[in-house]
Amino acid sequence: MFSSDSRPKFLKPGESSWSEDKPDLDLNHATTFVYNPNVSLSLEQQRQRLPIYTNRSHILYLLERFQTLVLVGETGCGKSTQVPQYLLEAGWCDDGKVVGVTEPRRVAATTLAARVATEKGSPLGHVVGYSIRFDDCSDPQHTKIKYMTEGILLREMMADPFLRNYCVILLDEVHERTLYTDIVMGLLKKILRKRKNLKLIISSATVDAEQLRDFFNVNSGKDSSLDTATILSVEGRLYPVDVFYVKEPVPDYVKAVVDTVLKIDTNEPAGDVLAFLTGQEEVDRAVTLLREHSAQRKDSSQKMLILPMYGSLPNSEQLKVFRFTPRGLRKVVIATNIAETSITIPGIVYVVDCGFVKLRWFNSDTQTDSLVIVPVSQSSADQRVGRAGRVRAGKAYRLYLEEAYNSLTVATPPEMQRSELSMGVLQLKALGIDNILRFNFPSPPPAKNLLLALELLFALEAIDKSGQLTKPLGVIMAEFPIIPLYSKVLIISGEFGCSEEIISILSLVQVQNIFNKPSSGQASIKARVAHRMFEVEEGDLVTLLNVYQSFMKHGGTREFCNKYFLNYRGLKRAQEIRQQMCHLLQKFDIPIVSSNGDTEKVCRCLTAGLFPNAAYLHYTGVYRTVRGQQDLHIHPTSVLYTLEQPKWVLFCEILHTNRSYMRELTVVKPAWLEELAPHFYEKRVERDH
């Protein structure tokens, strides 16, 4: 049991300024179940109950009148599922054209497509389909509404720069402002000038509408009748949400989330809970703690159904959170910010917000792209609170002080302005955009970041001195849906005689967290012993390879994973991704061969692509990158953490908390860097060390 003393202490809602402009809550409110008044209605009746339905005719009118429509509406108002159907029903697809809907996250694309297919009474992949990285469920002959990630639309632009198959493009969740969102918007602005019959809908849950309208409006004069872009706001249906703040800062927000969920379960009426954490490891830790605690409880009148939710979960696991909660259970979803706006989980009454988010952040001085855990913005915090007010009056528990909320930034900077840009630049080059510095981005990135991206692509031999894509390497790299460092490794793996192994490694890197790590007790010790049998001194990537090879050797069974404390769902997902990577290599006639246990071939191949991510052991005991001179440390989860520190390593990513930690490490020899990347390192390796 958690002691009550350790639980976060919250201010009463009346003590928070948040509640001042909200209706008073009925303090005697004694609802003991979550009631969805629409659940017994037909699908058509449910569609008509959505807030967007009253705007149906107006949306269609505005799309006839303007080329671009900025549609602002709360998550859950129906804009993502209904607007494409309104267009289909109004005859926009009668001439064989398609309505394309882009989503920043694959889970949104797949779940929305499944819902709309159900509403249309059509099997998924027929009239309504989806296409995401490593998974295409659409039919070129029959699909009229196609959900996809933004990266997929970008790839379609490579094949058809004018998107002639589409009559309308709906860019959904634009407020997330991912790297691809901004690139796609910049490209669509060019396409709209050439294709006057193509219509664009920009859908956003927050009010940055004027900036978006002005970006797409080609009318620069004062006569508004000549405007080509307009805004429509859709009112949502929100119940009041009471917000609680902690009285003092919490030292461990993961444990505080667990304690708060348990407090809700003990003290609050029935209703599902959504808790926000920053990443997969934290989510898995919280889920494990809650499941252990739930199994021990005897005092609870109802059991908790505890579910994780993050981007790299297999699709079948992600879909579990959308099912209605069985009677006698309280659903508790522990999620990353994927649940902030991208998806609507039914039945949520209580929200727990840890107050942090994990973002990619590129430091141009050290030339490193880090994962950084930072406080959320006010916009994100408000979106999280809004998840609680969908089915009835809700409660939100913020694990930070009210003063901290007031000092948060208003919005998170667009990814374009804080990320490493090599992948985006590579895609733009493949689309024939020669002068990247003059490309019309909605929020221009720092010029230095663009130049560093060009430098990196040149070092990887993806572009030549004049900035053109190299053939065949650069052209093929642009076709691969993974970052340029990985695509280079994959493409050259045939030459190094280890493509079988590299495919396995890169598939596992996409998934993350292959090892199950119980939080405490005998199970924790058993897991540590079990994992040791896979560990090798070459580092984490070769260790992952050992895990996958053992998994396949033993038939890929759940029993094997249980015995060795491995993540079965993650390994099955890696298996799916691996299959798609094999198809890609076959498409470009890259031989699929095995190194037959020669790990040096594998490590040399990794060096030939990951060389920009090399770090050496400095005499002070920390690691340094050769370019940028940033102090780095081996992450505690690495197999190298307890071994004698190797002189040189390659890392896949950097996680910045109180220190900068390297993750997914491979031990290399400095001579390999000199041999395989002389243009990047020259004789610096010898000179400096």
Image: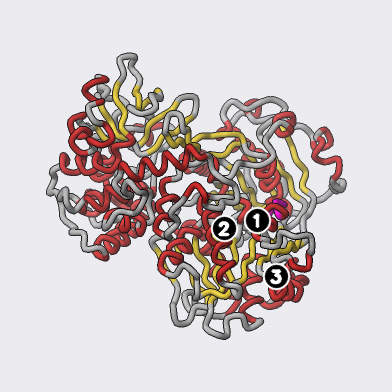
Mark 2 neighbour class, 10 Å CA radius: few under 14, some 14 to 19, many 20 or more: many
Q: Which mark is residue 492?
A: none
**Marks 1 and 3, the one that precedes in the sequence:** 3
Mark 1 and mark 2 in contact? Answer it, CB < 8 Å.
Answer: yes
Residue at 61% x, 55% y: name it.
Answer: 174
Q: Look at label 1 and name its amino acid.
A: Phe
Does 418 lie within the magenta span?
no
Residue at 55% x, 85% y: name it.
Answer: 95
Relative side of 638 to 597, left or right: right
Q: Which mark is residue 215?
A: 1
Q: Quadrant of residue 514?
A: top left
Q: Up-down: is 191 above or below 265? A: below
**Span shown in magenta:** 204-209
Mark 1 and mark 3 in contact? Answer it, CB < 8 Å.
Answer: no
Residue tagged 2 = 185
Q: Nearer the viewer, residue 293 or 277?
A: 277
Secondary structure beneath dot 1 equals helix
**Marks 3 and 2, the one that precedes in the sequence:** 3
Q: Look at label 3 and name its amino acid.
A: Phe
Relative side of 74 to 459, left or right: right
State the CA–CA distance, disc 1 to disc 3: 14 Å
Residue tagged 3 = 66
Q: Look at label 2 and name its amino acid.
A: Met
SS majority, magenta: loop
Mark 1 neighbour class, 10 Å CA radius: few under 14, some 14 to 19, many 20 or more: some
